[in-house]
Image: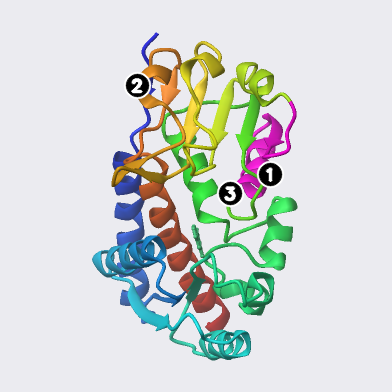
Amino acid sequence: MVAKIINGLEVSAAVKTRVKKAAQELKDSGVQPCLATVLVGDDPASATYVNSKQKTAGDLGIATRDHRLDSTFKQHELVELVHLLNNDSEVHGILVQLPLPSHINEFAIVNSINPIKDVDGLTPYNAGMLQNGMAILKPCTPSGVIELLDYYKIDVSGMDAVIVNRSNLVGLPLALMLIEKNATVTICHSKTRDLQTKLKNADLVITAVGNRQRFTLAADMVKDDSVVIDVGTSRQNGKLTGDVDFESVRQKAAWITPVPGGVGPMTIAMLMKNTVSAASISKGMNE
Ligand code: GUN
């Protein structure tokens, strides 16, 4: 079987159309949705992501603040900036781009964000709400993966899902979201024994490694007619690639996401969706 392509550009465009309309409605009711991004240091990949987030927000009628800080910025200064944004009634969403420089404790920063402005869904409060099936603001990349599965009506109930990633940004929240949809989930990582067998038995494989030298998902590693979602991104000779050997795996899987044009555009679309949700929560609180 040749896999059907899961088109993240098409699905993200549909999400963005809905978000743009919701942003306009909020604006008409007197609330201008606003996203503040914070970037510390000069990592080029992070700068590219933040630039895209800023541009997409502008395209959808979401106002932005853009804080770019030197890599020597201190942890307590960053906490102070987050507190200023927490207390700024015109700002509805706060995104601190990760990773942060090693002298800054990421948990301390994430934990300083007011959960109602936490458009990454990473604060302990929102992570706990997700675990309880009650979250409004959920992490963007996993929500984007779920949006893709829903759009193509891929029913994961009863599926054996293998996630190759255990981070707070991707693997852990995605596991919760898939369990909520009745999948049976295995989280794998660098210390997992016999990853090959786990992958080969999986109906749904989601990989987010981002290093082709360390991990490449080849056709002989997946089951016939499986669903393969590629969240990894890395550069090979200047070209953006995923974790998956796309050309060979697509000959075997039932569904597959390309890189670029798969999960990537979804992350940004879901961030915009969360920003509008955060603006509407704040509107509700001020009424
Ligand atoms: N770095 C890579 N992905 C993300 C994301 O979704 N949010 C933040 N804040 N940083 C990231």
Alpha-carbon span between mark 3 and mark 2: 25 Å
Q: Which residue is mark 1?
A: 176
Was residue 191 drawn as part of the magenta stretch in this picture?
yes
- Badge 1 marks a residue whose secondary structure is helix
Give the extent of the magenta segment: 170-193
Crowding near the residue tagged with mark 2, few <14, some 14–19, many ≥20 C-alpha atoms within 10 Å: few
Q: Is residue 183 above or below residue 125?
A: above
**Circle nearer the viewer, 3 or 1:** 3
Q: Earlier in the sequence, mark 1 or mark 2?
A: 1
* Residue at 68% in and 74% down: 111
Q: Which residue is mark 2?
A: 247
Alpha-carbon span between mark 3 and mark 1: 10 Å
Q: Which numbered marker is on residue 170?
A: 3
- Counting from the top left corner in percent of width and height, residue 14 is at 32, 46
- Counting from the top left corner in percent of width and height, residue 119 is at 52, 66
* Residue at 49% in and 89% down: 88
* Residue at 44% in and 17% down: 254
On screen, residue 275 versus residue 186, left or right, reads left
Inspect the image, locate mark 1, and give the three-letter code of the amino acid beneath it.
Leu
Q: Quadrant of residue 148?
A: top left
